[in-house]
Image (spheres, helix red, strand yellow):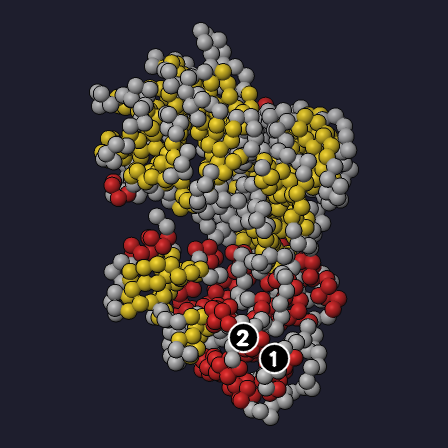
Amino acid sequence: MSAADRLANALTDRYRIERELGQGGMATVYLAQDLRHDRRVALKVLRPDLAAVIGAERFLQEIRTTANLQHPHILPLHDSGQVDGTVFYVMPYVEGESLRDRISRDKQLPVDQALQVAREVADALGYAHERGVIHRDIKPENILLQRGHALVADFGIALAASRTGGSRMTETGMSLGTPHYMSPEQAMGERDLDLRTDIYALGCVLYEMLVGEPPFTGATAQQIVAKVLTDPPRPLTEQRRTIPSNVDAAVRQALEKLPADRFGSTAEFARALGDAGFMGTSAAHRPAPRTVRTNQVARLVPWAIASASLAVAVWLGLKDRSRSDAVEPIFASIDLENTGISGTGSDNFTLSPDGRQLALTVEQGTVGLAIRSLDSVGIRLLARTRGANHPFWSPDSKSVGYFTEDSLKVVEVASGSVRALCETPGGSQGGTWAADGTILFSAQQLGLLRTRAPGGACENWMPRARDDLRARALRPYFFPDGRHFIATGDQDVWLGDLGTDSLVRLGDLTRAEAVLAPPDWVLLRGTNGLMAQRVDLGNKRFSGEPIRILSQPVNPRGHTAVAVSSNGVLVRSAPATFDSAGPSYEGVGVVERGSGVLRRLGIGTGTWRDPRVSRDGRRLVLGGWNIQTFDLASGRWVRVAGPVETGVAVSSRPIWSPRDSAIVFQQAGAPPEIHAVSMASGTVRSLLQARGGGPADVSPDGNRIALESFLGRVHEWDLLKDTVVRLFEAPGPVTGLRYAPGGGWLAYMVGSGGGTSDVFVRRYPAIGDPVRVSTGGGRHPRWRADGSELFYQEPSGAVVAVTVPRMGAGFGPARTVVPASVFSDWHGDEFDVSPDGQRFYFLIRPRVRSLGLILNWHGLLQRPGR
C-alpha cells in the first residue's frame, strides 16, 4: 500500500481522493472531494524524504502561519495535517490553468494581459509583505489563472521549508527556488532574504510573459546561475518592439543585481509599469553591476555540478576566504543522467583524492566502470572494465584499481588502458592505494594482501592475525602517511600498521559501516545517521566522542553510502528506502547461467520480497503488501491474495505447492499466521499460527511445511496429522530451509552474527548430522529440480553451484554460475533459479541516479546533526 493509499484510508471521512493531478519539486498533487463542505480541493502530499528532513510538525506549524492570508489574488490554505508521517495540505481546486501552461501554449502573452497578471501578483505579494511573509518561490508554476485573473499559490511553503529544513533541503536533491527566477542573493545562499527577492522573481516572470523565455537561460543550472550573478538581461524592447520603454525600464530595475537598486516595494514596481514616463534609475542598456568578482566565479563554476536537479546551494556561503575551514559546508546534487550506479553501497562509487572525479560501477550490459568528472558534463564509460567492482583511486587521481571475479586490475583514466596485477581468489571487499605504490586489499579467506603498482607479487600481510580475523571480509583505507590504515568488517573497525604487521580493534560499529575521511577522521554510517570520530594514531584509539554530522532521513535499514576526498569533498548516496513490507525495487532481472549479463524484465517499481519460481518454471511469485504472480513469458501480473482477504497487512514468504495448485504464505501479525490460497478458486484459508518463524518450504509430497526459527529450533508441520514436531537445533538463526526436490536432503543457512551466515544440509527425513557446504560464508540455498545441484550465494554476491553427492560421496567444489559483478553487494537481494538450473532471477534495487555532494564537510563538525 502506497503512502497515498494509506493517507486516503486515514482521511476517508474528510476527503475522497479522485486522481493525481501532477508532481512538483516538493509535493504530489491530487484532486480530492472535500466531503464536509462538498467542494473540490487540491490535496498536496509533501515528498516523504522532505518531510523526514524538515520534520512534519515543524513544517505544519510554519505553513499554518500563512493560513490567515486572505486576499483575492492569494490561493488560501484550507487544511493541513499528517498521517503516519505523511504530511498533507489542502488548497482550493482552481478550474483553469497555470501561467506555465499558458506560456507553454502561447509563448508570449499580449502586453496588456501580461501587465495585468504582473500587477495582480504584485498586489498579492504586497499584501503578504506587509504581514511579514515572503514567498521566495515566485514562478509561472505557482501562479494560477482563473477567468483571466491571477492567483498566487503555495504561499509560505518555501518559507516553511527554508526555516525548518535550512541547508538540509539540498540533501534531498532539491533547492528552495528555481534557478531561472532566483535573485542573486538567493542563488548565493543568503539566508536573510527580504521582499526584494520576490520583486526580482516577479520581474523574471513578467520578462518571460513578454518575450517567451526568462531573462537568463542556459543548458545547465550552473550556467543559469553564473548569468544571474554576472550578466545584464537583454533589453525587452530589442526583442519585441510593442513593449513600452517604461515597462522595459521597470523590469530592468526589478532585475538589478543589488537588492538596494531594485524597487522598495511591489507597489512601486506596479506603478512604474503603468507610468509611461518612467525611465528607471540608470541609463538604458547599461551593464548590470557585478556583485561577484570574475575570479571568484571562475573558481566556483567547476563545482556547479551539471544536473537538471542541481541544488543551487553549491553557491551557498562561499566568500573570498583563504581558510577552507572558515567556509560553511555547501550542499549540492550530482546528476548521473540516465546511467545509474549498479547498487547503492560505497563499493559502487569512489571519489578521487583531489575531489574532482567519481569512479562508478555502472551497467553496460554487465557491470563496468565509468568516470564522472565534477567539473564537466557527461559520464565516460571505460570499455575494457567488464565485471569491475569495488573501485579505489590512486593517490595522484590518475588511475583506478578495481576487482573482477578473480583478479585485481588497474585502469588508467586518461587512456583507458588496463593491466592485471594479481589474482584474488574468491573476490575482494575492496582496496586502498598509498603514495609509495603499495596497494592493500582484501581477499576471501586470506584476509589482507598487498602488492605494488605497476606490478609485483601479491603477498599475505596478515601472518600474525587470528584465523577468524583472517577469514573476515575487511575493507581497508590508508591514512595519508601510507603506513597506517583502518580496516572495517563484521561491524568492527581495526587500526593497522604496515610497519608492525598488527591490527588493533578500535571499536564496535554497532550496525554501522566506516569510511576514512582524511586526514584522521572515520565516518561511521548507520542507524544513527552519519557520525564522525577522530583517530589518535599515536595511542591507537579513537579520540573523543563521535559527532553526528548528518541525520538519517529514512528508515535506519537504508544505510547511506559515503566517499570522501583528501580536500574536504564528500559524496553520499540517498539511503535505500523501506517500508513495513520491505525495500523498494525497480524490477526483476534474469541472468543466464555463465553469461554474467543481467537482463531486466518489464516490471515497474514496487515493494516486493521473497521471489520464488513455480515448479513448472513458468511463473514467479513475490510477496510484499500482496502476493502476486508474474508470468515469465507474457509479462502479466496477477494479484493472488493479501490484506483484503486476510485482514492483515504485509504478505511474505510465498511458497508454491508441489503441483503449483496453491501458494502458502505468511501474514504479518502477533503471532504471524500462515495461509494458503488456491490458484484455481482464489480461496484463502488460514492454516497455522507461526511458531518462532514463518514458512520456508513445502515438502515434495505436499504434506509438510518447514518452519524457520530465529532461535535455532527448527520445526516441521505435518499437515496430515496437524502436528508440529521439532527436527533439529542449530547454534544460530535458521532460515532459507529448502527440501531437495527428490527428497533425501534438507538445505538451510545458519546465521553466525554480524550479518554472516553459512549454508548447511542434513539428511532427510531421517535427520542426520549437519554438513557444511559453504566454505567462506553463504546464504539462500536453492536446489535444481532434479536434485543434482545445490546453488547458494557467496559473500561476494556470486552465485555458485555444488554437485550433490551420490552414494556417500562429498559435495563437489563450488563453481561460479553468476559472477559477483552482476550483484556484487553482500547485502544483495534474494534470488531463485529455474527448474533446469539455467536461469537465475533477482530482485533489482533501484539504481542510484543522483548523488549528494558536500563541499567542506569539515564545516559540519561546527554545526553537528544537520
Report the residue that reaches farthest toward the bottom: 277
355 versus 594 height, above or below:
below
Residue at 67% of width from left, 58% of height from top? 303
736 versus 532 height, above or below:
above
For marks 2 and 1 on the same chain, the one whose residue lies earlier in the sequence? 2
Q: Nearer the viewer, residue 679 or 340?
A: 679
| Residue 782, percent from left and from top | 44, 24
Q: Report the side of 549 relative to 284 (left or right).
A: left
Q: Secondary structure at mark 2?
A: loop
Q: Write down the residue under mark 1.
A: 240
Instruction: Report the number of discs.
Output: 2
Q: Write down the residue under mark 2.
A: 108
549 versus 295 height, above or below:
above
User: Residue 345: in sight, yes or no?
Assistant: no
Residue at 54% of width from left, 53% of height from top? 550
Location of residue 66 by image quarter: bottom left
Badge 2 vs badge 1, beta-carbon distance below 8 Å: yes
Residue at 49% of width from left, 33% of height from top? 590
| Residue 115, percent from left and from top | 51, 82
User: Pointer 1: residues within 10 angstroms few (<14), some, or many (20+)?
Assistant: few
User: Residue 736: in sight, yes or no?
Assistant: yes
